[in-house]
Image (tube, rainbow, N blue to C red):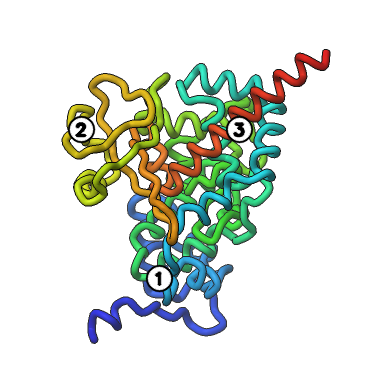
Amino acid sequence: MLAALACLPIASPAGNGYEAHPEAIRFADEMAQAHGLAAGDILATLGRIERNDRVIRLISPPSRPGVRSWARYRSRFIEPVRIEGGVAFWHTHADTLRRASDRYGVPESVIVAIIGVETIYGRHTGHFVAAEALATLAFDYPPRAELFRRELENLFLLARDSGRDPLSYEGSYAGALGFPQFLPSSIRNYAVDFDGDGRIDLENSPVDAIGSVAHYLAEHGWVAGAPVAVRAHIEDTTRAQALVDRGIEPSVPADALALYQVLPLGEVPDNALMTLVDLETPGAATEYWLGFRNFYVITRYNRSSFYAMAVFALSEALRTAQTETTVAGAQGR
């Protein structure tokens, strides 16, 4: 009973902002001690926002979780709007994408795919006040309070460093911002001024977004010129499950594949470590893929094998569509 009560949200005083919330007061004191920001200024800002129950509803796990379906998930991202929009985005920012790829070693198609999956190339970046969303989750959502308290801290620091009102940022219900949906800590640690205008702006500058996505992946270990994933054929699913159970970080050497009756349907680099990924769809055969280090790096952006495979699949579709568009353009001259 006590454990259950501990997970219940702590209600903010009715009709008031967060300035009187005990956790907000503690947060303001910690910000003052750690970063020299005035606790009164922090509380004054928090007093201008209230708990947003919609944020809690959106982030809470469903009471009746649905069945995972790779086919359904894939169809959300590998579809005409994102492919056609991605080709147009690639054409518009071709020079920037080439420069980012050259500097950070990340393929242009992967950079475009991540921005496409996240926001359809900046079309849907979210309209929640980021400080309100993060404060709600930091102070009134105990299951993930530590994470969002840290992000709220970074939002205040980002606002200080940028000379902005902390309440001026808008993003997703989880506080992610701009074209690439970076959390405030990621902006502070990985975002770059790629357009050279003296400031980082992921909300309005696709050039900064492109450079920042490439830099993020490079900093998390992207291997230039290395593959992402190859399809695999499984002879014995029971035996192969042992490899799936090793987790998402690559740990399976190539010489172990035959032992577990796993056949790569593509080239596997010598000495590569892999992870075996099972992409399940109810009523259909499970897809199996071997993910390499770069697949794992994509999961550092969003820690989901479905997400990483959607990014990879969209990047491949974009690369094919971009090539076809280029060839058609050349033939039409």
Q: Nearer the viewer, residue 192 or 181?
A: 181
User: Up-down: is 153 above or below 86?
Assistant: below
Q: Name the residue under label 1.
A: 141
Q: Is mark 3 on a helix, strand or loop?
A: helix
Q: What element carries label 1?
A: loop
Using the image, tell me which numbered label, if any, was put on residue 26: none
User: Up-down: is 178 above or below 231?
Assistant: below
Q: Nearer the viewer, mark 1 or mark 3?
A: 3
Residue 152 visible in this rendered orientation of the protein:
no
Q: Mark 3 points at which residue?
A: 318
Mark 2 residue type: Ala
Which residue corresponds to the image point at 65% horizontal and 51% vertical from the top-left?
124
* Quadrant placement of the N terminus: bottom left
Which residue corresponds to the image point at 62% horizontal and 26% vertical from the top-left?
195
- Residue 216 on image: x %, y %: 44, 34
Alpha-carbon distance for marks 3 and 2? 33 Å
Mark 1 residue type: Tyr
Q: Earlier in the sequence, mark 3 or mark 2?
A: 2
Q: Which of 2 and 242 is in front in this view?
A: 242
